Amino acid sequence: MSTPPLTIIWTGPAEQAVSKMTPAQCDNQDPHKWHEDKVRNFQQTTATLNPATKARIRAPAHTGGTDPNEAEHITVSYKKGNKDIDSPSKGAWHVYTGR
């Protein structure tokens, strides 16, 4: 079964932060594309998210957060239509970058 097309939206603060990033910080790729590719790949490989139609990038790649030792991740909210698809922790999803 194929996944529906995913529309990716950036919050204002996330857009501002990613606009300051350089390709060198994103494996020599355009920072927007690099983040969006990670978000799409995660959606396509996570069964719970297969029906998602929207992803809102809330924070570009960063370490820490609530857990100061957390690995680098992108903070994302996924939706099916207008309904949130909660992560196992009942909030936003952390898309780990593998770096």
Image (cartoon, rainbow, N blue to C red):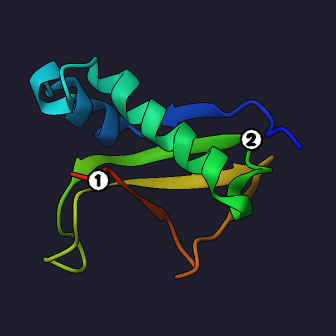
Question: Horizontally, is 79 left or right of 33 in the view?
Answer: right
Alpha-carbon neighbours of circle 1 within 10 Å: few (<14), some, or many (≥20)? few
List x then y, in percent, for residue 52: 73, 48
Q: Quadrant of residue 70?
A: bottom left
**N-term mark: 1 or 2:** 2
The three-letter code of the residue at mark 2 reads Thr
Q: Residue at x 21, y 30 (%)?
A: 26
Instruction: Return the residue at label 2.
Output: 53
71 sits left or right of 57 in the view:
left
Q: Secondary structure at mark 2?
A: loop
Q: Residue at x 59, y 43 (%)?
A: 55
Q: Quadrant of the N terminus?
A: top right
Kind of residue indicated by mark 1: Gly
**SS category of the residue bearing label 1:** loop
Q: Residues within 10 Å of mark 2 (few under 14, many from 20)?
A: some
| Residue in the picture at 18% in, 69% down | 64
Are the residues flagged by discs 1 and 2 in contact, CB closer than 8 Å?
Answer: no
Where does label 1 land, which residue?
A: 98
Expressed as whole percent of the image width and height from the top left, the position of residue 13 reads 30, 41
- Near-viewer residue (19 or 61): 61
Q: Position of residue 29 (x, y in %)?
A: 26, 19
